[in-house]
Image (tube, grey):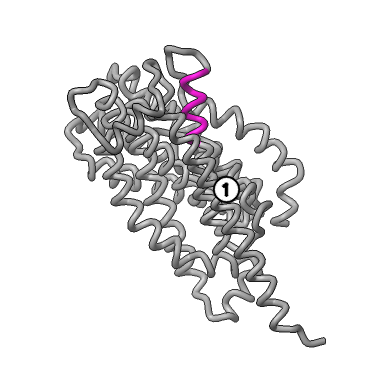
Amino acid sequence: MERDPNKNIGIQINRGLRTAWIVCIGLIALLCAFSVSIIYGSTNITLNTLWEAIFRFDPDVTQHQIIREIRFPRALIAAVVGAFLAISGAIMQALTRNPLAEPSLLGVSQGAAFAMVLFLTLIPGVSSTGTILVSMLGAGLSVLLVFSLSSIARGGGNPAKLSLAGVAVGMFLSSLTSVFSIHFNVAKQLSFWYAGSLAASDWQGVKMLGLAGLAGIVMVIILARPLTLLGLGTDVTKGLGINVRAVNILGVIAVLVLTGSSVAVSGTVAFVGLVVPHISAMLVGSDYRLSLPVSAVFGSLLLVLGDIGSRMINPPYETPIGVVTAAIGVPFFLYLVRSGRRRFQ
């Protein structure tokens, strides 16, 4: 039976329109959450003050300075890091065909954090660009170690064994991070990286993420179609003229760039890359040309809301944002362990 090409085109148009509506709704929700994140804090700010600080900035007004130098870059970093981690999780799930894959569960975030702590302890004068490169190096070595351990075991390609290897490597690297910080008596200063926090956000961090994002997003755009085809199987993908090896290499580089830069700015934030890609798949399907933009928007929304929650749980103190995202992600992880893995069997 021949397929009607007009019908397929109609289905694609409907999916595109549905995705556009979802993205628009997500952006509106993100804008609202972004505004609340700027307004809420130890010093509450009115919407009128926020409007004036953006369009009629007065450096002599303290609240305008708070908005411009503290609140705005913090909310912006939360949005960008959330998008980066969600996209990284989606890419990792596609490359490994593992619904449990995400930067923290496969040890990527812990590897980046360990490298950061190691270099900042031994070489305190590392530049901003150096911190990103160090994070990417640590993340890369962690990925190599996880896949090596997984391949040694019988049935190493099994998603469950890959996840177990990732958890083991992540715990090992987290322990090493603690040992170094305690030995050099810098545990309090470096707790930021292994607890996850946005309290130190500034415009320098925004610039770092912007530079990394330019490279990472270009790679993600290139990968969108090949990642979708990978879901059909390696043989089918090769038959369609896709270089699977090149896709895997480019995908890993994209994850290292996005995750490494995120860890350098915000520390280790878990489970964003696990939860958001599954929500996106439920909303728009498994076409990564559609799900990656949705993942970016909802990843941003989740982390901005998580940052607001971290300030509301125990005011005036801040709860590490990694704790907030873990509270959301752990039940979702347990659900996937029971049922979601059938998708990749």
Q: Position of residue 24 (x, y in %)?
A: 54, 52
The image shows residue 101, relative to residue 220, as above or below, that is above
Q: Position of residue 182 (x, y in %)?
A: 34, 18
Q: Quadrant of residue 5?
A: bottom right
Q: Position of residue 133 (x, y in %)?
A: 28, 47
Residue 91 appears left or right of 125: right
Q: Quadrant of residue 39?
A: top left
Can residue 304 be found in the magenta stretch? yes
The image shows residue 342, relative to residue 60, as above or below, that is below
Quadrant of the snapshot with the N terminus: bottom right
Q: Position of residue 97 (x, y in %)?
A: 62, 57
Q: Quick one: 147 or 225, which is closer to the camera?
A: 225
Instruction: Tell me how many marks there are.
Output: 1
Residue at image location 30% in from the left, 20% down from the top: 189
Crowd band around label 1 with a 10 angstrom C-alpha radius: few (<14), some (14–19), many (20+) = few
Q: Tell me if residue 176 can be seen.
A: no
The image shows residue 317, relative to residue 69, as above or below, that is above
Q: Tell me if residue 98 can be seen.
A: yes
- In the image as oriented, which residue stretches furthest toward the bottom? 2
What range is drawn magenta here?
Answer: 303-312
Q: Amino acid at mark 1?
A: Ile
Residue 72 appears left or right of 244: left
Secondary structure character of the magenta stretch overall: helix
SS for tag 1?
helix
| Residue at the spot of label 1 | 25
Q: Quick one: 239 or 301, which is closer to the camera?
A: 301
Residue at image location 66% in from the left, 53% down from the top: 283
Quadrant of the snapshot with the C terminus: bottom right
Q: Quick one: 247 or 306, which is closer to the camera?
A: 306
Q: Quick one: 219 or 71, which is closer to the camera?
A: 71
